[in-house]
Each structure stands twice: as structure tokens, then as C-alpha cells.
Image: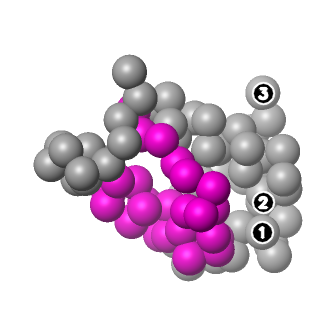
Amino acid sequence: RSQLSVDVPDIDLDCNLWTEGYLDSTAILELILWLESSYNITIQNEELTPENFATLRNIEEFVQRNTAQVGSGTSSVRT
């Protein structure tokens, strides 16, 4: 499994993970699978946007929105 080459505290929350070279296409797929498994959410193709996954802040906010939706029953939950 791939790992980030730096400690997470060294990455600014608003650092663009793509342009700075922290994520490539393989790493984003692994991230998506990990998020789905860890948070019991399903990430739809239309949600795979820079607004959701470009920065650590974007990822955190996306997961918070989707886990809140799961709790309210408005999001698709994997069984």
C-alpha cells in the first residue's frame, strides 16, 4: 500500500494534493476506497471533483457532509 512521503502534519490543510505531487491517480483510488470502507459511505462518480478531493480540508469537509447524510438517512450507505 502506498503511503504519503511526508508526515501529515507537514501538509497544510489547503495544500493542493494533486499539484504538489502528494496524490496521483492510483493514490486517489486508494484514498476513495479507504474513505468508503472507513466511513461506510459510497462515493459517486459525480462527487469525484477537486472541490471534494483537492486538499485535506476538502476531503475532511466532504467526509463530514457524507457521514452526516448517512446519519440522517439521505445518503447511500453500503451494506
Q: Amino acid at mark 3?
A: Arg
Is 57 colored magenta in this rendering? yes
Task: Assess disc 2: are there few (<14), some (14-19) or many (≥20) residues with their C-alpha within 10 Å of its C-alpha.
Answer: some
Discs 1, 2 touching: Cβ within 8 Å: yes
Q: Residue furthest top?
A: 79
| Residue in view at x 48 percent, y 41 percent | 42
- Left or right of 17 in this view: 73: left
Q: Quadrant of the C terminus?
A: top left
Tell me which label, 3 or 2, sits earlier in the chain: 3
- Left or right of 62 in this view: 7: right
Q: Quadrant of the N terminus?
A: top right
Q: CA distance from mark 3 to mark 1?
A: 18 Å
Q: Position of residue 43 (x, y in %)?
A: 52, 48
| Residue in view at x 36 percent, y 35 percent | 77
Q: Is residue 10 visible?
A: no
Is 50 colored magenta in this rendering? yes
Disc 2: which residue: 22
| Residue nearest the viewer, comparing 17 with 62 | 62
| Residue in view at x 63 percent, y 70 percent | 49
Disc 1: which residue: 18
Tell me which label, 3 or 1, sits earlier in the chain: 3
**Quadrant in the rendering for residue 55:** bottom right
| Residue nearest the viewer, comparing 79 with 62 | 79
**Quadrant in the rendering for residue 10:** bottom right
